[in-house]
């Protein structure tokens, strides 16, 4: 069992090449249905969320276990709801809220795609919001030498 008792971790060996790998078996409750902006619906897909987060956290100090924990938390919150239908923007907001706490740069990268930033001003506005909430400090030394 994993630490949170939400999955079974198995170590396996490929019979063809002999390499070892890990699989995770998760208990899935009621299927969640995601309602997209277009009105179409599709089944909830953890991998879709993972791809977006991985792109946003590329070259950031965030581990895959941090990403998995974030996705687990989002899915747990969605499954605790009374409705099995969830709007895509609700998922995006849950992911952004967690990323904001985890890494401001990754949050901005994710938000730029999710919120469809069109200009530099969009980034400036979002950075000002982060500064207003104290998530980033405008006077922080970025560690770069100006000489």
Image: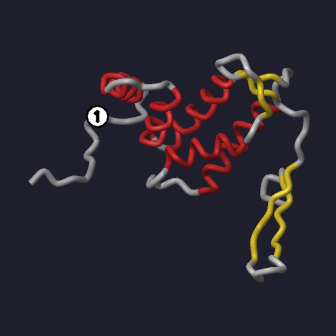
Q: Is residue 24 above or below residue 37?
A: below
**At which x and y percent is residue 96?**
56, 32
**At which x and y percent is residue 4?**
79, 52
Q: Quadrant of the N terminus?
A: bottom right
Relative to 107, 34 lies left or right: right
* Quadrant of res 25: bottom right
Residue located at (69% from left, 46% from top): 47
Residue located at (44% from left, 55% from top): 59
Q: Is residue 80 above or below residue 40?
A: below
The residue tagged 1 is 138
**At which x and y percent is residue 13?**
81, 77
Q: Which residue reaches farthest left?
A: 147
Q: Quadrant of the C terminus?
A: bottom left
Q: Is residue 83 above or below residue 5?
A: above
**At which x and y percent is residue 103?**
47, 43
Residue located at (82% from left, 63% from top): 9
Residue located at (57% from left, 44% from top): 53
Relative to 22, 8 lies left or right: right
Name the image colouring.
secondary structure
Q: Which residue reaches farthest bottom?
A: 18
* Quadrant of res 92: top right
Q: Residues within 10 Å of mark 1 (few under 14, many from 20)?
A: few
Element at label 1: loop
Marker count (numbered): 1
Q: Which residue reaches farthest top?
A: 39
Relative to 112, 79 lies left or right: right
Q: Nearer the viewer, residue 38 or 11?
A: 38
């Amino acid at each position: 069992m994993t630490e949170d008792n939400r999955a079974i971790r198995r170590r396996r060996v490929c019979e063809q090449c002999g390499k070892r790998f890990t699989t995770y078996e998760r208990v899935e409750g009621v299927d969640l249905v995601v309602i997209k902006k277009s009105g179409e619906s599709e089944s909830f897909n953890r991998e879709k969320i993972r791809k977006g987060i991985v792109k946003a956290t590329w070259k950031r100090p965030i581990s895959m276990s941090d990403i998995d924990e974030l996705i687990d938390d989002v899915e747990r919150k969605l499954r605790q709801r009374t409705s099995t239908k969830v709007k895509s923007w609700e998922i995006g907001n849950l992911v952004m809220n967690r990323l904001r706490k985890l890494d401001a740069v990754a949050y901005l990268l994710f938000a730029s795609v999710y919120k469809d930033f069109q200009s530099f001003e969009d980034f400036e506005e979002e950075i000002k919001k982060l500064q207003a909430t104290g998530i980033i400090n405008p006077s922080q030394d970025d560690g770069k030498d100006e000489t």
